[in-house]
Amino acid sequence: MTERHEHVSGARESMQAMDRRGFLRQTVQGAALAGVGVVLAQEANAQERTRVTPVDQHAPKTGRLVQPDEPIGLAVIGVGGQGGSHFEDYCTREKNGGNLRMRAACDVYAKRLNKWNTHAAEITGHGVDTYMDYHKVLERDDIHAVVIATPDHWHARISMDAMDAGKDVYCEKPVTLTVEEALAVRDKVFETGRIFQCGANAAAKDWCWQARKVIQEGGIGKVLWAQASSNRNSAGGPDDRGGEWNWPIDEAATDDPNAGENYIDWTRWLGSAQPRPFSKPRFFQFRKFWDYNGGIATDLMYHVLAPLTIALDAQAPERATGSGGIFVQHDDREVPDTFMVTLDYPDDYTIVMTSTMANRQLNPVVIYGHRGTIRVTEDGAIKVTPEKEFKDWFKEKYSVEELIVEPEPRDDIRTSWFNAIRSREGIVLGPETAYRTMAGIKMAVDSYRQDKVIYWDHVKECYVDSHPRPNRSSKVPAEQA
């Protein structure tokens, strides 16, 4: 296929069009989008949200359904590290006989477009069309579904535009940059009936679904709290990067539109983020900067919280605290290298998450109940053990003294998305769970940055100044606790 690169004039026109849409003004005048304006967000969101009735996904309001024998036409928007992984995976699936076809790649960096066009031809025998303006991708009738692997601050806008254009969407985690955006994306899914999957891989692991079943059948009594962690060690040793997210920087990269494949459309990349001079560290190492993401919380903790949200069938949390700091990796980063989170939930339990990018020793996933405890083993099974006070009760319920539930085979999260595009059901991490997870993640980031406790009313779906249930106590009857 012919290679297509959109030039800087197209970038300016696209940004003007985006500004006319007023997306930021729809979501709290950009206050919460910037990550520090929760007070303004509280005032703007004082009224309870109007609920959207979901459209039947078998009869979407935009676009059309893929026909049974028709290959799924795909495009990847954002073909950096994670997007490149998607692109290569789907080219390989096509080569191996999968009923799909890679048709386009979109990125603001010309060199990436050249790379993946060449690589597609090597794997599949055909190139792909390449674009810098994602709107051009969405205009294509032969593209049925898009993968969004851009920096986080673009996730919501592209997802919503894609669904309006009749495309099914796989959006990398975190689902969005803010809670308000996550709600907007959820509502757009409901309005359009398009398939939407958030790409937190751990949500497809069987343990969280098995744990959910045990909890719902009362296997550990009243849930009290849960713990999990996500750690790395990114400095020292043979793979020393000097700190997490210090990915390689291409010194030849420039915002000069006459630079050929070294050109980066910086204005387009910034999008709704604060205007700044061209910065290669911000482009290549964006996860170190608040404008574009939430650091550890959005890159790694989302993977941890999403399966726990599934296991606990959790609403959005009501209260969040975040703490930590830059303790080791003192470079140009703004985000902490060590981050701790506590989240209190409407069903009266707490999730505690710990993380550091300077020590890889993990706290195991454990869910603590009044009558028993669920532990996730290294091989993905769950081990359920009773408290000694409830051994007899547990033995009567399960006929064993300790319950081991081995994982059942499940499709990976990408395969489940392809299956859902055809069946119109079976999404692993859909828009509601994605929003609930995002709420906990962003509230913790806000707490850390503002050095205060953050509250969220999950009924009205807005920030509030104090706990939405000031006289709270557990609603679980004593005989069920």
Image (cartoon, rainbow, N blue to C red):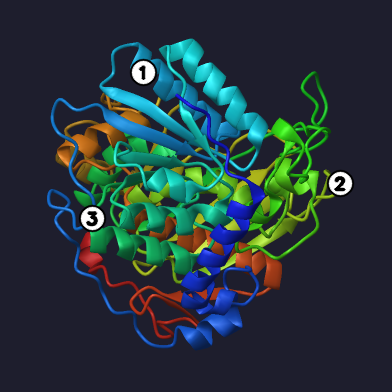
Query: Is 31 or 71 nearer to us in this picture?
Result: 71
- 310 relative to 92, above or below: below
Residue 93: numbered disc? 1
Question: Where residue 120 sits in the image (x, y, percent)?
Answer: 48, 19
Q: Quadrant of residue 273?
A: bottom right
Q: Amino acid at mark 1?
A: Arg
* Residue 181 x/y as whole percent: 46, 65
| Viewer-side residue, 3 vs 374 | 3
Name the residue tied to disc 2: 331
Q: Secondary structure at mark 1?
A: helix
Q: Which residue is mark 3?
A: 62
Q: Secondary structure at mark 3?
A: loop
Q: Residues within 10 Å of mark 1 (few under 14, many from 20)?
A: some
Say whether residue 365 is left or right of residue 50. right
In 3D space, how far apart are the residues under numbered discs 1 and 3 (Cα atoms)?
Answer: 27 Å
First in residue order: circle 2 vs circle 1: 1
